[in-house]
Image (tube, rainbow, N blue to C red):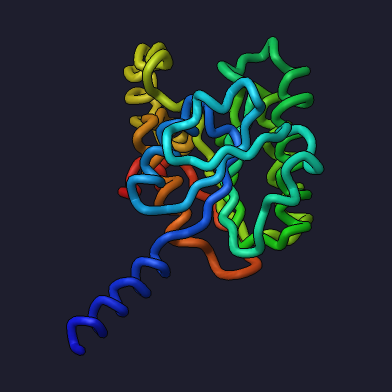
Amino acid sequence: MLERYQKHLTNIAHMMSTREIFVTGGTGYIGRRLIALLLARGHQVRALARPGSVGRLPAGAVPIIGNALDADSFGSTLRTGDTVIHLVGTPHPNPSKAAEFIRVDLTSIRAAVAAAHQAQVSHFVYVSVAQPAPVMQAYIAARAEGEKAILEAGLTATILRPWYVLGPGHWWPLVLVPMYALAELFPQTRAGARRLALVTLQQMVNTLVWATKNPPPQGTIRIVEVPEIKKIRA
């Protein structure tokens, strides 16, 4: 009898520690690695994908066929208790892609927020960008509008603000490390250097997993800046 009771308690604890997670951008740079880790941790993951991209999702994720730019194409698949992680964005952003930031980044976050609000999901997680910054103004503006949409919708949310995420195919900013070290030496540039510091792909994935396990109080928005991203362990 005691063994059965202990097993029951273990099952309850497992159910409380795992979550139903809906990911947009699951076939991308961060998304594939995040989904793999979420599945390994026992979470149930549904991932939005276009028909031609389903094969790029990690095995174990449940594909949801839809268009990230159109809330009507996936909104009905969201559930009240879901955690939604929004990762859609323009690959390799640079100043020449200002129009893409509006067409893809801003349109997709507005669609995801509208769908999440309609479904009354429990937690919305958004990868934004560090701000303010002296460059990439169009990109920052689009992401700031995304944050505004979350606020206006009244969602319970976690917003991550990385600057550049180092990883496979994304190593070139390492040449800037000496400049960051120099900027850290002076009080007038120290805060900016820390806000715009480089983070690794693993640090981002760790922070996203942590966010799913630790939602903020209901009805509030939590901002996670670069210094915290660098410290969090999944």
Residue at 39 percent across and 23 percent down: it is 166
Instruction: State left or right for residue 17 relative to residue 79.
Output: left
> Picture coordinates of residue 152 (x, y %)?
78, 55
Tell me what residue is drawn at x 34 percent, y 30 percent.
Answer: 185
The residue shown at (18%, 82%) is 3
How far across and how far down the image is residue 209, in percent?
Answer: 41, 49
Q: Is residue 98 above or below residue 229?
A: above
**Residue 131 visible in rendering:** no
178 to the left or right of 65: left
Which one is in front, 76 or 146? 76
Q: Is residue 79 left or right of residue 189?
A: right
At a point 73% along the width and 19% down the height, the residue shown is 100
- Residue 200 visible somewhere in the drawing: yes
Q: Quadrant of the N terminus?
A: bottom left
Q: Is residue 219 above or below residue 192?
A: below
Query: Going by the picture, which residue comes out furthest to the bottom?
Result: 1
Quadrant in which residue 202 is drawn: top left
Q: How many marks?
A: 0
120 is higher (above) or lower (below) than 110: below
Residue sitting nearer the eye, 197 or 125: 125
Residue 59, given in percent of the width and then of the height, sits at: 42, 34
Measured as percent of width and height from the top left, residue 218 is found at 60, 69
Residue 8 appears left or right of 196: left
